[in-house]
Amino acid sequence: MPPTLTPHIAPPSRTAELWRSIEESVSEACVLRAEGREAEAIVIVQGKLPALISVWSRGAGISGEECQQVLRELFARVQQQVATATVCKRLVLQSVDPRAPRRGEASAPVQIRRRVPLDDITGMLDALDEGERMAAVFRQNFPSITSRPQAALAMG
Amino acid sequence: MKANSMKSSAGGSAVLDASQPRAHAETLLVGLDWGTNTSSVVTSLRGSEETITKELVPTVVGYATDDVLPGVLPGDAKVLFGRMALKHKSNLRLVRPLQGGVIHDTEAAEAFVGHLKNLLHVDGREVRAVIGMPASSDLVSRENARNAVRGVFHKVLFVPEPFLAALGVRNEANLNDPDYQDPVLNSIYIDIGAGSTDVCLVQGHYPTVDDQLSVPFAGDAIDQIILDRILAEYPESGLTLARVREIKERHSWVLAEDGTTRAIATIMVGGKPRKIDVTAQVGAGCDALLQKTFEMTRDLIARANPDTVAELLRNVIVTGGGSLIKGFGVALQAKLIEEGFESPQVRVLGDNYKDYVATGALKVARMARENQWQTLLG
C-alpha cells in the first residue's frame, strides 16, 4: 500500500485487490528491467498496468492528481527496493563466484615427500599427486594451521 | 567442457571446441611457464619430438579505455595482449593476471591464456598443458590456476617450476658423453622469480620438502625497496612500480660499490623530466636480494651430505628474472667464498631461463601417463 496517502484512500476490497495487483506488477516490471529483460518489462508496463490503473483509479475515491501522486510514490518505492536487492545480489554473487581467485586461505605448499629419480617423470607426477592429496587432507583437518603464511610453511 | 568464448583480441577469439577431439596422435602438448612478467610456451604433437610453436609473451592484458578514439588501437580491439598491450599502453588499462607467480585476476588470466591458445595452432586438436607453478604454491593457487585455464585446455598438470627447469636444462642426448657434466646430478638450483625466491638441492632426484627453501622475497620486493627509497628522496616524483621495474631492468646490478657504473634514470619530478642518479636506490634493492639468496644457499648447503658438498658447490645454478641482474652470479660466488666455501662456481642461465621451464614442461607432457592428466570439466 502507498505509505503516505493510504489512510485517506480507504479503498473497498475490490480496490484493495486491484492495488495489490498494481504493486505486484510494478515490482515484477522493475525486477525484469533490472535483469535486463526489457521486452518482458514493457509488456507489463504498457500492456497490463494501464488497464489495472484505470479501473483502480475509478474506484479509489481520490482525485486524479492524488492517484498520480500515489502511483509515483509506488514506483519510487519499488525501484528503490529493486536497486537495493540488486546490490545485495551482486555482493552475494561476488562472494560465491567460483571463478574469482580465492584468497586468505593459504594452505601447505604442494611438495613431494619421497625421493624420485630425475629420470622417473611419471614417478614424480605420482609423488606430486600424493603431495596434493596430503595438502588437501592437512587443510581439511588443520585449517587454523594452514591459514599461517605460506612462507612460514615453506620454510618448515 | 565449457564452451567458453574468450574476450577477443586483435587476433580474434579462442573458443574451446567441445566436439570429439581428434585422434590420439594429434593431441597438442603444451609446455607453459606462466610467469608473472613473461610467459614462455612451447608445443609439439603427441608422439613427436618436433617443436611446433615457441613463444615468449609478456604476461599482461590491456583493456581499451573508455575514451580511446576509433582507429587508434589495431582493429579497434577491446583487449590486447603481451607486446601489443605494452606498445599501446597509453590507451589501455594494463592488468597483470599473476602476482607472485599465482593467479591474481581470474578474468585477465582467462583472457591471457585464451590469447596464448590463439598462438598455438590448435586446429581443433585436444590440448594438454603442463604448467609450471612456483615451488611454494599451495592447493588454493593450483585451484585458481585450474579455474583460469578451464575451457582453454582439455587436460592439465601442474608441476613446480624448479622441477621443470631442472628437466629443461638437462640435455639427455649428451648423457652418454663422458665430458658432459649433467647439471642436475648434484647441484643447487636458485630460482628468483617475481614473487618468491626458491633454492633447491637437486641431487639426482626431484627436490623433496626437505631439499628446498622458499621465501616471498624476489623481484617485486626489490621493486618496492627501490620505489620507497626513490620516493623518500624525491617525494614529488609520482614514480610508479611499473616505471621502477623499467629502471631496474635497465640498471640493476650488484657489486656496484666500486662506483664506476652509475645508474642514471629519467624521472618526472614536479612535472619535468630529470636525470636522477638512482645508483644507491637500485643497489639497495639488488643487494637485499643478493643477501637473502646467499643466506638461503648457505642454509641449504648445510643440509646436504658433506661428502657431496664439494661437487655441489661447483654447480650452483641461478635462474629466473633475478638472474638477469648484472653481476649477480659473480657476487653470489664472491659471498660464498667469503663465507669459507671452497671453489664455488655459480652459473647464471641468463636470458633463456624462461625456455628451460617451458621445455621441461613439454618433456613432462610427453612422458605423463594417460591416467595422470587432470581432465578439466566445464
Image (cartoon, rainbow, N blue to C red):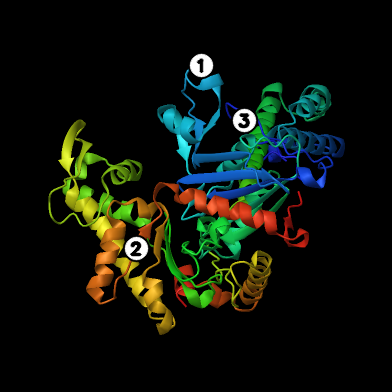
Task: Look at 58% across and 68% down and name the residue there.
Answer: A118
Question: Is label 1 in a helix, a strand or a loop?
Answer: loop
Which one is nearer the viewer's eye here, B374 or B22? B22
Which numbered marker is on residue B31?
A: none
Question: Is label 2 in a helix, a strand or a loop?
Answer: strand
Asked if A2 appears above or below B333 in the picture, the reply is above
Distance CA(mark 2)–CA(mark 1): 52 Å
Using residue A140 as the reference point, say whether residue B160 is left or right of it.
left
Could you tell which of marks 2 and 3 lies nearer the N-terminus?
3
Could you tell which of marks 3 and 1 lies nearer the N-terminus?
3
Residue at the disc numbered 3: B8
Which one is nearer the viewer's eye here, A96 or A155? A155
One can see residue B35 in this view? no
Residue at the disc numbered 1: B70
Residue at the disc numbered 2: B346
Distance CA(mark 2)–CA(mark 3): 44 Å
